[in-house]
């Protein structure tokens, strides 16, 4: 009896310790790395020079680590693009030759120096917005005839708002909104909100992606745009550029926690990796396959989305930043993110769509059990054990009493 009791207590204590260890290791997850983040607009642009034309803005975020620096460059020259450059120096700099950068051939006008410290570089470009009339409600643009598509919106031809007025240097965010001159955009716009992070965390609004010190985020939304048909759905075309390793394959992983992104159990990551699937990931774009049909969504406003297979692209991406930094030597890949699935409401019901992507260096963040889920697990698993333990103790106490009663008459 005593042995059983001791065993139960021992087991319970061990279990508790194990839970605490597992949970603390989940919570930390090596995410203690912090960076000192600072944001500047148009680095090195001398204000006495001709100011850049309205709508051209280059945001530079320097995320300084202990031994390294991550440079993020977000630019609206041409199609919006986010460039990530990782150096193994804490004093690397961004140098822009502004007259050339703003000229027709910007090739080679942006450098990160000293160039020998650059370890990795990759860019993500938001190239096109496709709109198609989903007459049969399939939400499979890949299978539709070309006649179902409207002329795509070329984001390189959009007029973008002035980035200078939409900067938050303390929160490290920048907002870029724009549209073309067509009727559809007369009351609406496509917006991109760029955020850089210096430590681990999550944004409040869904999908609340987990970010860390090596990541940045772009939230894209389409607000108030008049669709060109009543059954319109949209796809967003993304391109990736690298001098050697652009983003090539998309891994879709199961996500274990839906507390932060209700009803979505998957996470997709488009990764740059030099070799096969076992080689380390150099950089990534990560997203949850979900878009939201309202600015302040509730559960019903979530709509799943899917991506097409990445393909190699021969043409030069329509981004001034990419041309300025990569010049002619580069590789390009692209894919489409299609919002909504068959049966979900069409765009015309809310005239709103938002989608969020995380862009960063190294391995993408992994969602872990949240403290709330851990507490529920601990209570759920711990309570039955506690009841068993109490049961065992009671039985033992009773046995002892019975034994006492049994022995008394013999005395
Ligand atoms: C961020 O990058 C630095 C430098 O490469 C690395 O030491 C650190 O572990 C990374 N942090 C995370 C959370 O990936
Ligand atoms: C971060 O950078 C700012 C500006 O460069 C500097 O003033 C500050 O001391 C730095 N903080 C840390 C913790 O390094
Ligand atoms: C900016 O222009 C002024 C006046 O032309 C000059 O004195 C200054 O050195 C310039 N600064 C840079 C960083 O080029
Ligand atoms: C930084 O570099 C020094 C020497 O180069 C090395 O000892 C140290 O471990 C590095 N720290 C990090 C966080 O990588
Ligand atoms: C742009 O300039 C670079 C060098 O400055 C040159 O190699 C390239 O051919 C030019 N491209 C075009 C399209 O003129
Ligand atoms: C930085 O990386 C370059 C290229 O990989 C390497 O040659 C150089 O020694 C590295 N410097 C430091 C301080 O680690
Ligand atoms: C829609 O479905 C009808 C009947 O199945 C078919 O004839 C038609 O080609 C489909 N249209 C498109 C655009 O797929
Ligand atoms: C977008 O701009 C490019 C280059 O300026 C031009 O060739 C193309 O025709 C434009 N597309 C549309 C739809 O206006
Ligand atoms: C834009 O809004 C104005 C005023 O609300 C309205 O009169 C106009 O019809 C709208 N245009 C479109 C294309 O929806
Ligand atoms: C869209 O639906 C509305 C209301 O049902 C209708 O009045 C309008 O004509 C339709 N527009 C098109 C382009 O089919
Ligand atoms: C949206 O399109 C659907 C399908 O054609 C139509 O029934 C509905 O009336 C439209 N809604 C609005 C607000 O125009
Ligand atoms: C995106 O979708 C459109 C329409 O189906 C297609 O023409 C285009 O090639 C696709 N882009 C990529 C990168 O797959």
Image: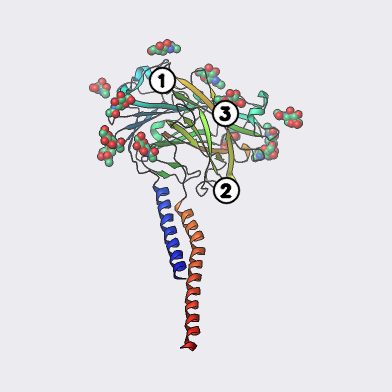
Is 124 on the left or on the right of 66, as rendered?
right
* Mark 3 / mark 2, whichever is N-terminal: 2
Front one among 139 and 368 = 368
Counting residues from the start of the chain, the first of labels 3 and 1 encountered is 3
Ligand 11 within 8 Å, label 2 CB: no
Quadrant housing the C terminus: bottom left
Identify the residue at horizontal 43%, vertical 17% (top origin): 329
Q: Is residue 13 left or right of residue 311?
A: left
Residue named by callout 1:
326
Residue at far front of view: 410
Horizontal and vertical percent position of residue 372? 47, 55
Q: Position of residue 51 (x, y in %)?
A: 35, 23
x, y percent for residue 282: 42, 30
- Residue at (47, 87) in percent of width and height: 408
- Residue 148's x, y, as percent? 67, 27
Between the C-alphas of marks 3 and 2, the distance is 28 Å
Q: Is mark 3 on a helix, strand or loop?
A: loop
Mark nearest the camera among 2 and 1 is 1
> Against 139, is 158 above or below?
above
Q: Which of 183 and 356 is in front in this view?
A: 356
Label 1's element?
helix
Q: Which residue is disc 3 drawn over? A: 309
Q: Is residue 299 above or below residue 6?
A: above
- Label at residue 189: none
Q: Which of 223 and 307 is in front in this view?
A: 307
Q: Which image quadrant is residue 281 in?
A: top left
Category of crowding for the residue at label 1, using alpha-carbon neighbours closer than 10 angstroms: few (below 14), some (14–19), many (at least 20):
many
- Looking at the rendering, the quadrant in which ligand 5 lies is top left
Q: Mark 2 points at which residue?
A: 299
CB at disc 3 and ligand 12 closer than 8 Å: yes
């Amino acid at each position: 009896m005593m042995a059983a009791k001791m065993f139960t207590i021992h087991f319970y204590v061990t279990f508790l310790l194990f839970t605490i260890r597992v949970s603390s290791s989940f919570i930390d997850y090596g995410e203690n790395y912090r960076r000192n983040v600072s944001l500047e607009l148009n680095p090195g642009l001398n204000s006495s020079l001709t100011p850049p034309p309205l709508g051209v803005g280059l945001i530079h975020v320097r995320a300084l680590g202990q031994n390294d620096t991550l440079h993020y460059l977000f630019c609206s020259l041409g199609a919006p693009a986010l460039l990530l450059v990782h150096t193994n120096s804490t004093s690397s700099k961004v140098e822009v030759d502004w007259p050339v950068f703003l000229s027709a051939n910007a090739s080679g006008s942006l450098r990160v120096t000293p160039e020998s410290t650059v370890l990795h570089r990759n860019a993500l470009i938001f190239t096109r917005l496709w709109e198609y009339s989903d007459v049969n409600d399939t939400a499979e643009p890949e299978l539709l005839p070309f006649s179902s598509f409207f002329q795509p919106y070329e984001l390189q031809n959009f007029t973008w708002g002035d980035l200078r007025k939409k900067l938050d240097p303390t929160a490290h965010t920048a907002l870029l909104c724009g549209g073309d001159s067509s009727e559809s955009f007369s009351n609406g716009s496509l917006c991109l909100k760029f955020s850089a992070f210096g430590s681990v965390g999550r944004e409040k609004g869904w999908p609340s992606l987990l970010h860390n010190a090596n990541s940045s985020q772009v939230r894209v939304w389409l607000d108030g745009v008049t669709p060109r048909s009543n059954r319109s759905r949209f796809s967003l075309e993304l391109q990736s550029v690298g001098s050697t390793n652009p983003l090539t394959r998309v891994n879709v992983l199961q996500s274990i926690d839906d507390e932060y992104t209700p009803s979505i159990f998957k996470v997709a990551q488009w990764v740059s990796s030099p070799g096969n699937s076992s080689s380390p990931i150099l950089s990534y774009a990560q997203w949850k396959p979900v878009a939201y049909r309202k600015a302040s969504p509730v559960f019903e406003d979530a709509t799943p989305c899917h991506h097409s297979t990445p393909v190699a692209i021969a043409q030069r991406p329509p981004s001034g930043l990419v041309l300025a930094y990569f010049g002619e030597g580069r590789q390009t890949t692209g894919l489409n993110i299609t919002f909504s699935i068959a049966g979900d409401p069409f765009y015309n019901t809310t005239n709103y769509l938002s989608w969020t992507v995380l862009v960063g260096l190294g391995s993408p963040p992994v969602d872990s059990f949240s403290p709330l889920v851990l507490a529920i697990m601990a209570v759920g698993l711990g309570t039955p054990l506690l009841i068993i333990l109490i049961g065992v103790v009671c039985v033992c106490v009773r046995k002892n009493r019975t034994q006492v009663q049994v022995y008394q008459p013999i005395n």
